[in-house]
Image: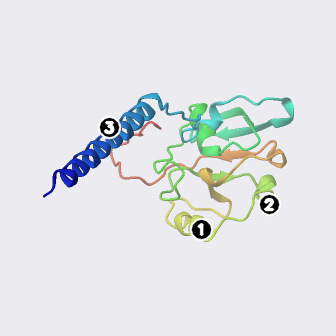
């Protein structure tokens, strides 16, 4: 090879190395200076732990426990009944965390409010068919979202629900 050609190859190699080093330096600075930002995300049921922003949002409902105890609860428009029950320590399990995979949030809706609820879908009806102590006014609490029309809603808990536990253990919501 001629000396000239060798010199050109060496210069080209130096230029490539220099360019690659500059690219790596820029990339490392970019990565080093890059900040990751996240937005606030609600967890399951976290919305229900917030108080109403105004009195216009308030929806008062009543839970009736298995023992017959009436517990008034102050909810708000948009609250999911299952998570609202968890907030106020109402003994409604919700084992599937509102994913429509169980019947542990089964409730009886008072007759005055039943027609104010949207119709249950096929998946909810299929699950309710497996719920013990099914009645005409049975619904899944996880499928009831509060609206102003549901003011005064009364929900009665059934005597029992079906879950994997047979020893009387009631899991705590997570």
Query: What residue is disc 1 on?
Result: 125
State whether residue 133 is above or below residue 72: below
| Numbered disc in front, either 3 or 1 | 3
Query: What residue is disc 3 on?
Result: 21
- Label 3 sits on a secondary structure element that is helix
| Numbered disc in front, either 2 or 3 | 3
N-terminal-most mark, 3 or 1: 3
Residue 141 x/y as whole percent: 61, 50
The picture quadrant where one finds residue 44 is top right
**Which residue is rendered at x = 75% and y = 61% of the image?**
118
Evaluate if marks 2 and 1 touch, with contact meaning CB atoms under 8 Å apart: no
State whether residue 135 is above or below residue 98: below
Residue 12 x/y as whole percent: 28, 49
State whether residue 117 is above or below residue 78: below
N-terminal-most mark, 2 or 1: 2
Q: CA distance from mark 2 to mark 1?
A: 16 Å
**Which residue is rendered at x = 67% and y = 52% of the image?**
144
Foreground: 25 or 133? 25
Identify the residue at the far left of this view.
1
N-terminal-most mark, 2 or 3: 3
**Which residue is rendered at x = 68% and y = 60% of the image?**
137
Q: Which mark is residue 115?
A: 2
Q: CA distance from mark 2 to mark 3?
A: 71 Å
Judge from the rendering whether residue 38 lies leftward or rightward of residue 1; answer left or right: right
Residue 8 x/y as whole percent: 26, 50
């Amino acid at each position: 090879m001629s000396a000239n050609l060798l010199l050109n190859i060496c210069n080209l190699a130096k230029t490539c190395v220099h360019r690659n080093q500059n690219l790596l330096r820029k990339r490392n600075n970019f990565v080093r200076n890059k900040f990751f930002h996240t937005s606030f995300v609600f967890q399951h049921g976290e919305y229900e732990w917030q108080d109403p922003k105004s009195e216009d949002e308030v929806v008062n409902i009543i839970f009736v426990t298995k023992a017959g105890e009436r517990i008034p609860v102050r909810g708000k428009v948009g609250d999911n009944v299952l998570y609202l029950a968890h907030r106020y320590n109402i003994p409604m399990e919700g084992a599937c965390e509102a994913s429509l995979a169980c019947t542990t949030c089964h409730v009886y809706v008072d007759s005055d409010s039943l027609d104010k609820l949207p119709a249950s879908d096929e998946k909810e009806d299929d699950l309710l068919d497996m719920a013990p102590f099914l009645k005409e006014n049975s619904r899944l609490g996880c499928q009831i979202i509060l609206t102003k029309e549901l003011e005064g809603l009364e929900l009665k808990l059934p005597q029992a629900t079906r879950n994997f536990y047979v020893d009387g253990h009631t899991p705590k919501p997570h």
